[in-house]
Image (spheres, rainbow, N blue to C red):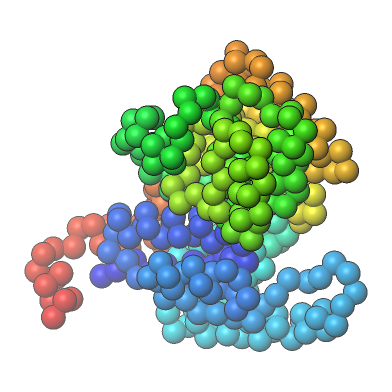
C-alpha cells in the first residue's frame, strides 16, 4: 500500500520549490505515489518533470490587474480547469491534497474538498495569497511561515506555524575550500549579492553604481550573482575597475555562498528569506516593488522587525538606499553579529518533516499511515508481484 498524495501549486519558484521539498520528505518517510497539478504556463511544467515527478497541467491563469483581452478567457479557463481537476481527483483518488500556492491551487483543492479528500495548505508569505485566503477555512490545516499571516485568514482557520520547507544541504567543506571553489583569492570578508536565478536588474544597477563611484567598502570582496542575461556586461565592467569581485551568472550551491558571506543583498521572496534564516545570514532586502499585494515588502518587514536585516526600498533612490544600508552593516561588525543571531532564531528547524508529521495525524490519514507503517513483509512481496 502507498500513500497517494496530490500536490498543487505553481506559477513561481516560491510555490514550486516548497512543493518539491515536501514531496521529497514524504517519499523518504513512506511508500508513496505523488501526482502534481500545475499550470501550463508556470515554471512547474518544466521543474516538476525534471525532478522526476508526474504532473497534470491545467489552463488556469491569473486575473490581470489591468483591462486586457486575456481576462476574457479567465472564467473559461477556470471552468475548464475545475472540470479537469474533478477528473484528476476521481482517477487518482488521493488520500490527501496539499496546496503550496498560486492560482492552480484553487481548482485542485476545491475538487479535492468536493470528494471529501483532506486538504492542507502551505503558505510561504507573511501576507497570504488570495487563493489561500479563499480556501483556508475549509482546509484541515494551513501551515504558516510567519505568525502574522494568521491575522489575514478566516478566524476558523486551523493555522499552524511551521516555517517554510527549505532544502539547504549541510556544508562539509572548510571556509577556505569554499573560497577556492569560487576562485576567491582575497582573504577579505564577503558580501553576497543576488537577485534570484534570473538576477534583479535594479539591484544590479544599484551595486554597479556603488562600484563605479568608488562607494563599495574596500574591506569586502563582492560575490555577485547577476543572472545570465546581464552577466557578461557586468563581468566586463568589473574587470575594468580592477576590484575584488567575483561576478557569476548563477550560483549553483547557495548553501556554500551563505557559509562564507557576512551578509547578503537580495530580494525578499519567502523561500529566499527562509534559506537565509536556516543559514543564519542577515540581509539587506530589496523587495520587488510590483510584487502581488506588496508581499515581498511585508515579508521583509516581518524579518527586520525581529532584527534580522535592513530594507532598501526599490525606488528612484535605490542607489542611495543601497549605499546607506551596505555601509551601515559593513562598518558595524557588532550590528551584523546581532542580526546574525536574530536571523538564526527565525529558523523553524526541519519544517518539511514538521508539516508531514502533522499531516500524518489528520483524521482519515492516520489510519492509512498506520496501515503503511505496519504492513508485513509478506504483504509487501504480494504487492510487488
Position of residue 331 relative to residue 144, above or below, is above
Looking at this view, name the residue that lies furthest to the top: 334
Q: Nearer the viewer, residue 165 or 107?
A: 165
Q: Residue at x 62, y 66 (%)?
A: 11
Task: Give the position of the C terminus as an image quadrant.
Answer: bottom left
* Residue 183 visible in image: yes
Specify whether 41 is left or right of 349.
right
Task: Give the position of the N terminus as an image quadrant.
Answer: bottom left
Q: Nearer the viewer, residue 138 or 166?
A: 166
Specify whether 70 is left or right of 5.
right
Quarter of the image for residue 291 reads bottom right
> x, y (%) of residue 52?
37, 70
Q: Nearer the viewer, residue 132 or 180?
A: 180
> x, y (%) of residue 208?
72, 41
* Residue 140 visible in image: no
Q: Residue at x 49, y 68 (%)?
A: 47
> x, y (%) of residue 271?
57, 48
Specify whether 42 is left or right of 177.
right
Q: Residue at x 74, y 28 (%)?
A: 215
> x, y (%) of residue 262?
54, 27
Amino acid at each position: 500500500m502507498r500513500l497517494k498524495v496530490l500536490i498543487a501549486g505553481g506559477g513561481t519558484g516560491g510555490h514550486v520549490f516548497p512543493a518539491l521539498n515536501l514531496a521529497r520528505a514524504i517519499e523518504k518517510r513512506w511508500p508513496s505515489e505523488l501526482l502534481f497539478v500545475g499550470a501550463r504556463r508556470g515554471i512547474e511544467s518544466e521543474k516538476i518533470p525534471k525532478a522526476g515527478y508526474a504532473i497534470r497541467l491545467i489552463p488556469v491563469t491569473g486575473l490581470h490587474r489591468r483591462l486586457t483581452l486575456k481576462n476574457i478567457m479567465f472564467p473559461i479557463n477556470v471552468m475548464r480547469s475545475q472540470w479537469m481537476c474533478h477528473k484528476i481527483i476521481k482517477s487518482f483518488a488521493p488520500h490527501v491534497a496539499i496546496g503550496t500556492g498560486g492560482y492552480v491551487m484553487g481548482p485542485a483543492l476545491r475538487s479535492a474538498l468536493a470528494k471529501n479528500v483532506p486538504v492542507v495548505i502551505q503558505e510561504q508569505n507573511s501576507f497570504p495569497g488570495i487563493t489561500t485566503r479563499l480556501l483556508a477555512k475549509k482546509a484541515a490545516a494551513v501551515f504558516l511561515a510567519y505568525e502574522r499571516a494568521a491575522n489575514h485568514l478566516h478566524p476558523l482557520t486551523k493555522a499552524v506555524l511551521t516555517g517554510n520547507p527549505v532544502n539547504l544541504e549541510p556544508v562539509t567543506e572548510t571556509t577556505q575550500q569554499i573560497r577556492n571553489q569560487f576562485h576567491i583569492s582575497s582573504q577579505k570578508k564577503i558580501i553576497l549579492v543576488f537577485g534570484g536565478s534570473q538576477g534583479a536588474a535594479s539591484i544590479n544597477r544599484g551595486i554597479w553604481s556603488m562600484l563605479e563611484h568608488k562607494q563599495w567598502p574596500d574591506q569586502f570582496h563582492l560575490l555577485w550573482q547577476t543572472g545570465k542575461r546581464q552577466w557578461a556586461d557586468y563581468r566586463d565592467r568589473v574587470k575594468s575597475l580592477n576590484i575584488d569581485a567575483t561576478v557569476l551568472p548563477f550560483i549553483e550551491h547557495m548553501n556554500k555562498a551563505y557559509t562564507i558571506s557576512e551578509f547578503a543583498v537580495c530580494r525578499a521572496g519567502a523561500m529566499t528569506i527562509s534559506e537565509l534564516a536556516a543559514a543564519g545570514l542577515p540581509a539587506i532586502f530589496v523587495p520587488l516593488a510590483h510584487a502581488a499585494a506588496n508581499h515581498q515588502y511585508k515579508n521583509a518587514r516581518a524579518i527586520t522587525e525581529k532584527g534580522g536585516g535592513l530594507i532598501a526600498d526599490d525606488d528612484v533612490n535605490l542607489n542611495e538606499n543601497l549605499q546607506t544600508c551596505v555601509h551601515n552593516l559593513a562598518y558595524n561588525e557588532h550590528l551584523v553579529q546581532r542580526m546574525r543571531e536574530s536571523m538564526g532564531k527565525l529558523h523553524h528547524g526541519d519544517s518539511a518533516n514538521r508539516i508531514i508529521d502533522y499531516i500524518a495525524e489528520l483524521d482519515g490519514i492516520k489510519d492509512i499511515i498506520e496501515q503503511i507503517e505496519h504492513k508485513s513483509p509478506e504483504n509487501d512481496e504480494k504487492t510487488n508481484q
